[in-house]
Image (cartoon, coloured by chain):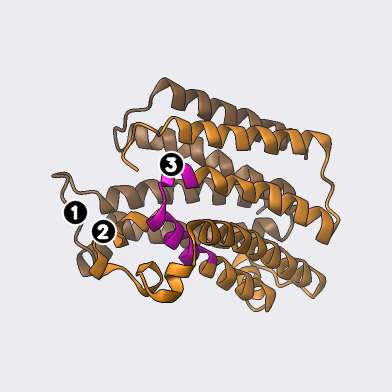
Amino acid sequence: MTASVALWSSIVLGACAQVFLKRGVTRPDGREPALGIALVRSPWVLAWAACFVAATGLWLVALSRIEISYAFPLLSIGYPIVAVLSLAVLKERIALSRWIAILVITIGVAIIWRSA
Amino acid sequence: MAVDAITETPAARPAFARDTPAMRRLSWQGAAFGAIALAACGHLLIKQGLLAAAHSASPATPMQNIFHYLIQPAVPAGLCIYGVGTLLWIRAVSRHNISFLYPLTALNYVIVSIGAKLLFHETLSFGRCIGITVVVLGVALLQLSARGDQS
């Protein structure tokens, strides 16, 4: 596995983990989630845990071979990924101002990516 | 973040989120900037450990590699510092609006990059600095767009 594959997999898995967690702790009826055993049994929360562990492992693999001043700011591409997934999976509304912010972050990440 | 779930009721709050005398002395500024500093230190320490691992003989498969990294003292130490930073962060979040606090975490990109230049002599090119600045601006804009949301 190349270092850049590890880095991008880690970032995408980390972003997926956030969306799974949000889905896992949100109840359709809008009530407070039951904490404890019920939460741990939720397949969404288990998916979050699996993605989180995999993302952390891949992050270590990536960081062992890539400069941290390059890899660390690239993590912020997670914000746009979470936004698109939250639109697709959670049906969250995304205002125009938020799309603009997401665009700015993506441009910043592209500039850092090209600086490698 | 999973932070919202545990700050719902005072009884459910863990010790670091409760109003103990020691915690009352800790302002939200102290908690937030402490959390940011510890997270940055944690990541730099992890990088330090990974650099040390790269110098010693490296095993073959990715799983062996990950195990090899985790036994470098600086890697678990960095993860622990990052964990303490997360606890402080929960403290800060319980005191102040998340929409105000969250953009501050983008400071980490700046601190980590400068730390990497000073400690590991990484190249901070002009392009990389511009990119990090644009990302920080974008994160700030993102939170401005969250003003209307429930904090």
CB atoms of marks 2 and 3 within 8 Å: no
Report the label total.
3
Q: Badge 1 sits on which subunit?
A: A
Mark 2 and mark 1: Cα distance apart in space = 9 Å
Q: Would residue B91 be counted in the magenta stretch?
A: yes
CB atoms of marks 2 and 1 within 8 Å: yes
Residue type indicated by callout 1: Glu
Who's the residue at 59% across and 70% down the image? B81
Mark 3 and mark 1: Cα distance apart in space = 21 Å
Q: Badge 3 sits on which subunit?
A: B
Say which of marks 3 and 1 sits in front.
3
Residue at numbered disc 1: A32
Looking at the image, is mark 2 or mark 3 earlier in the sequence? Answer: 2
Who's the residue at 55% across and 37% down the image? B139
Chain A: give its colour. Answer: brown
From the viewer's side, name the closer residue of A91 and B135. Answer: B135
Label 2 SS: loop
Mark 2 and mark 3: Cα distance apart in space = 17 Å
Residue A99 rendering spot, x and y as whole percentages: 47, 25
Q: Which residues are magenta?
A: B85-101
Q: Is residue B93 left or right of residue B132?
A: left
Q: Badge 2 sits on which subunit?
A: B
Q: Would residue B22 be counted in the magenta stretch?
A: no
Residue B79 seen: yes
Discs 3 and 1 lie in a common subunit: no
Residue at numbered disc 3: B99
View extreme (top): residue: A96
Kindly indicate which chain is depicted in orange in the rendered structure.
B
User: Badge 2: few (under 14), some or many (20 or more) residues near its Cα, within 10 Å?
Assistant: few
Residue at numbered disc 2: B8
Q: Is residue A12 above or below residue A39?
A: above
